[in-house]
Amino acid sequence: MSEVLKAPLVVEFPFTRSLGPVQSAFLTGLRERVVLGVRASDGRILVPPVEYDPTTADELRDLVEVAPTGTVTTWAWNHAPRRGQPLTTPFAWVLVRLDGSDTALLHALDAPGPDAVHTGLRVRIRWAGERTGAITDIACFEPHDGEPARLTGSTGEFADPVGGIVAAARLDYTYSPGRAQTAYINSLADRRTVGERCPSCRKVYVPPRGACPTCGLPTTEQVEVGPRGTVTTFCIVNIKAKNLDIEVPYVYAHIALDGADLALHARIGGIPYDQVRMGLRVEPVWTDGARYPDHYRPTGEPDADYDAYKELL
Amino acid sequence: MSKEPVAVVGIGQTKHVAARRDVSIAGLVREAARRALDDAELTWADIDAVVIGKAPDFFEGVMMPELYLADALGAVGKPMLRVHTAGSVGGSTALVAAQLVAARVHGTVLTLAFEKQSESNAMWGLSLPIPFQQPLLAGAGGFFAPHVRAYMRRSGAPDTVGSLVAYKDRRNALKNPWAHLHEHDITLEKVQASPMLWDPIRYSETCPSSDGACAMVLTDRAGAARAPRPPAWLLGGAMRSEPTLFAGKDAVSPRAGRDCAADVYRQAGVTDPRRDIDAVEMYVPFSWYEPMWLENLGFADEGEGWKLTEAGVTELDGDLPVNMSGGVLSTNPIGASGMIRFAEAALQVRGLAGEHQVERARKVLGHAYGGGSQFFSMWLVGARPPES
């Protein structure tokens, strides 16, 4: 058996976040080098602030300034910083209870090594040079040998408050289509379409999935289908999708290849888009170097009878 | 031991819009939850558990948002759980909450579903580039349009039926203050002149992209007796699923949908849905799904659903009104859309639907589906408690 295919799959998107009043004040404050907490129903000051009381569920809106200095309540050393983390050199993840706060904030501490970090260590904020109203406006924390810093007297009201942020997210996967689809993809290199037959219901799946979704049995018997097939149904796509390099309008069709028991999806060409019809007989058109047929085109045969493919709709 | 009867005593929604830039996700869900509690005249302390639903995490990019939303929903110290069933999730979430009451696990449960589509792009989330696959699909419309064409071929429906549904739902939305689209100058001609996006689906026959949330308070018989306003009673509820693609799948009228409806009718003692059910809130993201689901749900024989639409039966003043609220075609915060159907069904039997109230609505069906016609969830609610 040939080796199973693998490829990197990166999923990334710049999600936008609307902040609401409390997070807006908190992040705008950071831009102005002010740290704000919120007073909870029981009088405690929560930093970072939350919109709703964690005990009573009351709406919290009473913003209170706390100092940019504080005390490490616990920590963990990060030997190997990864992309997107606050520092590029090894650092400590710390929970810091800022002076005036009753809860701790998670951030990074710039320290020469784990021996320089301990619970109870006094620290202060190192502000980023360029601040936009984001948690990264705190570049990191650094050791601070001194008294609590003075407050600025902020009320939490700022000119030009930040209303939203962009939270770019990225996930890196190693994707494998599995044994059955690997065999299918490898046969496509020889311009052959090979599906798999369920040992129980005898249905031929193209592309194969390695198991029959109806019977729950593994499929192993390989069956070559096509190359010709019948358009069972279709739509004409008139809007261009992001990241999809196909000129519109184009016909997106369900095609039941001869010998297959369900339709696969492909583009129809070689015929004006408004002349494509259900029952049209088609065959693949290959281009050099492509994994899949570029599109399917009419064979010139008479259209298939509706009864011949209606069960495949 | 028989099940505990389940009552809907509180309903809340946000005003659905394209983008709620003034609130966080927490602020959005809070609004709907607060309104549901106010409707029931209850406080956070009266809630025993919270059941929340939303569409896939890629739609906002917040992994497990239920963890961060516990404070906003008063769930700290209580059981809280999340339900995932793609577009049908709002319905499934309500049913999971109802089961907790029916099984007497909890007396009063808050259930909520939401989507803040403005924080991401659902078309991106539905069309991730998978290695080794040929990129072809153009979002949900490109997926469903061939099935609509198959329905038209199978039923012989005239190609104007889709526009009739869109015109009706958009006019119904004008009577619903919470609906997203309020197209005051809508005409049938405008719908029919709108551009073809995924032929046979026109722009005006597609759902919008919305930010919104919907919440309900479900309670037991004792809770219903204390309720300040008439409750809606759960008469039957069911969920079914099937693969998106398999040999023998009927994409026009999926078996999972038919089986799900049959289960609900059996529980509720409904033998003729067309006669026994007064109105329907069904999940119609593309206009043609109204006639398709009318058949799938047993309101019309196969191939006959479009005749009900064409004859005006599904209009607000028709014999079987469908999507009195304006439906998904007028409001689509994806994760919440199913729950809005369930909640609007409940509002009707409570007599609290306002301008889009159907007279003498005694039994109303709420319907949701999701994935590639893969998940189905439905409930039938009534103005009177189930006979035990």
Image (cartoon, rainbow, N blue to C red):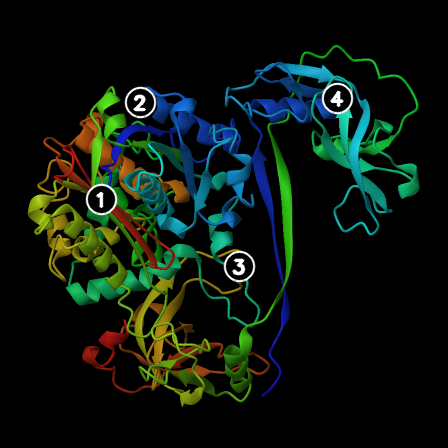
Say yes or no: labels 3 and 4 on the same chain: no
* Quadrant where the N terminus of chain A is found in the figure: bottom right
Q: Name which quarter of the figure residue B333 lies in.
A: top left
* Quadrant where the C terminus of chain A is found in the figure: bottom left
Chain bearing mark 3: B
Foreground mark, 2 or 4, reads 2
Judging by the rendered image, the residue that carries numbered circle 4 is A32
C-alpha span from label 2 to label 4? 42 Å
Question: How dense is the environment of label 4, judged by Cα within 10 Å: few (below 14), some, or many (20 and up)?
Answer: some
Three-letter amino acid code of the residue under disc 4? Glu
Three-letter amino acid code of the residue under disc 2? Asp
Is residue B223 shown above or below A287?
A: above
C-alpha span from label 3 to label 4? 39 Å
C-alpha span from label 1 to label 4? 63 Å
What is the secondary structure assignment of the residue under circle 1? loop
How many numbered tags mark residues here? Answer: 4
Three-letter amino acid code of the residue under disc 1? Met
What is the secondary structure assignment of the residue under circle 4? loop
Chain bearing mark 1: B
C-alpha span from label 3 to label 1? 48 Å
Foreground mark, 2 or 3, reads 2
Three-letter amino acid code of the residue under disc 3? Leu
Judging by the rendered image, the residue that carries numbered circle 1 is B1
Is residue B214 shown above or below B252?
A: above
Q: Is residue B325 visible?
A: no
Is the Cβ of the residue at disc 1 closer than 8 Å to that at disc 4? no
| 3 or 1: tag closer to the N-terminus | 1
Judging by the rendered image, the residue that carries numbered circle 2 is B39
Foreground mark, 3 or 1, reads 1
Question: How dense is the environment of label 3, judged by Cα within 10 Å: few (below 14), some, or many (20 and up)?
Answer: some
Judging by the rendered image, the residue that carries numbered circle 3 is B128
